[in-house]
Image (tube, rainbow, N blue to C red):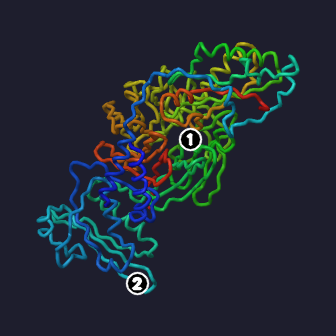
Amino acid sequence: MPRLLRHVLSFLLLAFLPVFAAHAQLTIEIVGGAGTAIPIVIVPFESESNFPLGITGIVGADLTRSGLFKLVDYAGVSPRPTRAEDIQPAVWRARNADAVVAGSMRSLSDGRVEVRFGLVDVVKQTVLVTMSYTVTPQQFRVTAHKIADIIYEKLTGDPGIFSTRIAYITKQGPRYQLLVADADGADPQTIVTSNEPLLSPKWSPDGSRLAYVSFENKKPVVYVQSLATGQRMAVANFRGSNSSPAWSPDGRRLAVTLTKDGSSQIYIVSADGGSAARLLTSSGIDTEAAFTPDGGAILFTSDRGGTPQIYRASVNGGGAERLTFDGDYNVSARPLPDGKGFAFVHRAANRYQIALMDYATRQVQVLTDGPDDLSPSVAPNSKLIIYANEGGGRGILAAVSSDGRVKQRLVAPSADVREPAWGPLPRQ
Amino acid sequence: MRNLLSAAFIAVVLAGCQSTPTQESAPVEDKSATATTPGGASTGGTSSTGVSGTSGTSNPLRDPSNILSKRSVYFDFDSYVVRDEFKPLVEAHGRYLQSNRNARMTIQGNADERGSHEYNLALGQRRADSVKRMMTLLGATDTQIETVSFGKEKPRNQGHDEVAWAENRRDDMVYAGE
């Protein structure tokens, strides 16, 4: 790319990004869509214009971003429906809509706001859900994500992930930061800042803690940090390298890679620290452990067969089973929460691509084009995989649906972004 | 405007995807005489002052004409095998450690920027361990040599091409006190 054009584009980014995303460090761009997006109308809620942030704009953005929905125009319909029972299916079927959302907002005397909405399937002519919330204006964004989650689940059958958070690492000059943001990139919070590398953030299953690797003591050490208090503890700080943390599904233990006894091998430590118990033994490299959702096994990367490949082993001992055979570099396995397979990094013709293996068929589906797609992390509904495209030292985050059809890019204004980790569903 | 900007983003991203790295490793010059310790990677240990005991005037570790002043070993892509061309260098340091029992060394393993952060961390460790193993076979002791890995996190060459990658697939040997 010509340098001048790059400068012009940089200027465009700097000049216009704040307009689109005053609250967001990451801005999401859709670069592909499902073949069969659900046409949905989201009618602005009654009295919504009295509230600056509003609700329906965020709901519509969430649903559009998933790639599974396309917004149908409501202009010209009068009167606008404000309740599920006001929605006249024939009016919306004429616009080829399959579903319609309508609602209202009302100020209460204590300063809070009552938000009501209904979702109607105008094809089957049935009310799918009606809900009401009483919230403060500061909770509008959270409420909008909740509404989007409900609509997504009612219309697709899968849990929505708009209320989840993501963690990621940025590098700006010599400075590394571990950040946590909403899944739409809004409200980024700095968790750790260091002048030495930070690596491998991993959410505890309840979303209250992050494990990560820091080089601040001139070598890799695994820390666990509480998001609520900021307090942290070194849970693996043995002789040699300590890296690649992975939480057990009960949140009580971590698999880690240690070199205290020689080459990189996988051990289990308590989430409160203490001694390390060796889980597996090989003569080569074993690393990148990840527990299966039932906690009974780990997937990991090993070069025991001559090239780095993904293996599975029981946590109770016994042999390891090789799972990947296609190509000479398959690493970074991340099990799908639904237990049906795993995402991983597959190298083919020098391109690092995100791929998916299905346990039942043992088929590998390559989901991205590369050339430097790394660090996959699977959304809690198993439908989206976030990853980093690190090409050229200017990493950006991207996401791809697990069927490969929908692609998004999460663009940060200036930093080199890497190693995303998708957090769990919030506790109800 | 938004569509225009989206197109611009995609254009940037697509443009960034054009390079197709080759797997062959380019010939590499040993630049270690000029660049020894990567910033911020010093390790504590006992000083090696006075252990050379040869002429008393020149330290062989710092004499540019002495092979011991060279400190970097380079590796092939995906490999932790010490190439033949670097064996004399590793052997010289192994013999130095054998005859200078107070000397302590840290071997820092590194990887190029391609591929998994964590696997590269393990690969860098393995590269450092490969050199350590050769030295201990020549008589250096286990306690004299510590190995660490920076993986792909501390590239000496900040570039994104085969020349940079070849330079970053590297072990650095750093004596305590340096």
User: Residue A130: x and y, percent?
Assistant: 29, 70
Dot 2 alpha-carbon crowd within 10 angstroms: few under 14, some 14 to 19, many 20 or more: few
User: Residue A264: x and y, percent?
Assistant: 59, 29
Quadrant (top left, top right, bottom left, bottom right) of the C terminus of chain A:
bottom left
Dot 1 alpha-carbon crowd within 10 angstroms: few under 14, some 14 to 19, many 20 or more: many
> Regarding mark 1 in the picture, which secondary structure is present there?
strand
The residue at the point 41 percent across, 48 percent down is A4
The part of the image, by quadrant, that contains residue A99 is: bottom left
Label 1 chain ID: A
Residue indicated by mark 2: A108
On the picture, is B58 further left or further right than A218? Answer: right
With respect to residue B89, does A216 lie above or below?
Answer: below
User: Residue B17: x and y, percent?
Assistant: 38, 39
The part of the image, by quadrant, that contains residue A161 is: bottom left
With respect to residue A29, does B72 lie above or below?
Answer: above
Closer-to-camera residue (A153/A419): A419
